[in-house]
Image (tube, helix red, strand yellow):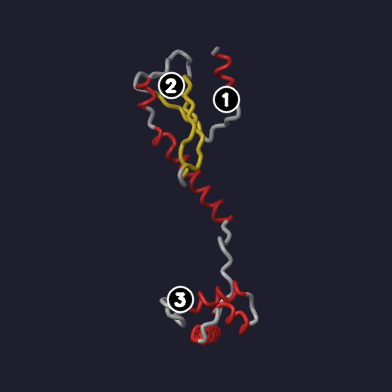
């Protein structure tokens, strides 16, 4: 590939999030640019570009190995991570609808109907739904809430009877 094609490809569609100057052990100046992305749930460096400032120094494996990325980009990564956290907190929405709060009295009524239906060997969710004038899925949620508050024992399962 020609130098022109390499430059066009490396810069096309990429804007660095941070760029810093680095001087290696030999005294050559380098411009190191980085793009940050969320990788495995945390902000990290995804792309690096290294360019010689004077154009006379070749890039070697040793020079690449000696670039202190954490030292060069640590503060910029921290700022990006904080900004990402701030944005995510602003966008936080409940993952699931939690429904309305039920009083102990309401849940005790659910438990009473539940136990009566279980004793009569009829479908408990349908019995609670009919008694409270709600849908079967809503009745199921109320039964779960009554169970969570201890009005229906956790080991009570109508299918096991």
Q: How far apart are marks 1 and 2 (CA)?
A: 20 Å
Q: Label 3 belongs to which residue? A: 157
Q: Distance between the residues labelled 1 and 3?
A: 63 Å
Seen from the viewer's position, the closer of residues 41 and 106 is: 106
**Residue 32, labelled with which disc?**
none
Q: Position of residue 24 (x, y in %)?
A: 37, 23
Seen from the viewer's position, the closer of residues 25 and 51 is: 51
Q: Distance between the residues labelled 2 and 3?
A: 72 Å
Q: Nearer the viewer, mark 1 or mark 2?
A: 1
Classify mark 3: residues with Cα within 10 Å, few (<14), some (14-19) or many (20+).
few
In the image, residue 42 above or below residue 144: above
**Residue 11, labelled with which disc?**
1
Seen from the viewer's position, the closer of residues 60 and 95 is: 95
Left of 11 or right of it: where is 29? Answer: left
Q: Position of residue 125 (x, y in %)?
A: 56, 77
Q: Where is residue 119 in the image (x, y as percent from the top left)?
A: 49, 86
Residue 117 can be seen, yes or no: yes
Q: In which quarter of the image is the N terminus?
A: top right
In the image, residue 129 above or below residue 14: below
For label 1, the SS is helix
Q: Which of marks 1 and 3 is nearer the N terminus?
A: 1
For label 2, the SS is strand
Classify mark 2: residues with Cα within 10 Å, few (<14), some (14-19) or many (20+).
some
* Residue drawn at (56%, 60%) of the image: 95
* Residue drawn at (53%, 84%) of the image: 117
Q: Which of marks 1 and 2 is nearer the N terminus?
A: 1
Q: Label 2 belongs to which residue? A: 29
Q: In which quarter of the image is the C terminus?
A: bottom left
Q: Which of marks 2 and 3 is nearer the N terminus?
A: 2
* Residue drawn at (53%, 48%) of the image: 84
């Amino acid at each position: 590939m020609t130098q022109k094609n390499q430059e066009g490809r490396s810069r096309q569609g990429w804007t660095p999030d941070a760029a810093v100057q680095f001087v290696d052990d030999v005294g050559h100046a380098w411009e190191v640019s980085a793009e940050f992305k969320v990788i495995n749930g945390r902000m990290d460096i995804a792309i690096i570009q290294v360019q010689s400032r004077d154009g006379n120094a070749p890039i070697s494996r040793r020079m690449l190995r000696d670039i202190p990325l954490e030292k060069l980009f640590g503060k910029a990564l921290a700022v990006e991570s904080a900004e990402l956290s701030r944005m995510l907190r602003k966008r936080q929405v409940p993952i699931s609808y939690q429904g309305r709060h039920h009083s102990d009295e309401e849940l005790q009524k659910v438990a009473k109907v539940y136990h009566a239906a279980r004793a009569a060997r009829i479908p408990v969710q349908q019995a609670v739904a009919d008694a409270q004038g709600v849908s079967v899925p809503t009745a199921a949620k109320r039964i779960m809430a009554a169970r969570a508050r201890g009005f229906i024992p956790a080991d009570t399962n109508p299918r096991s009877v």
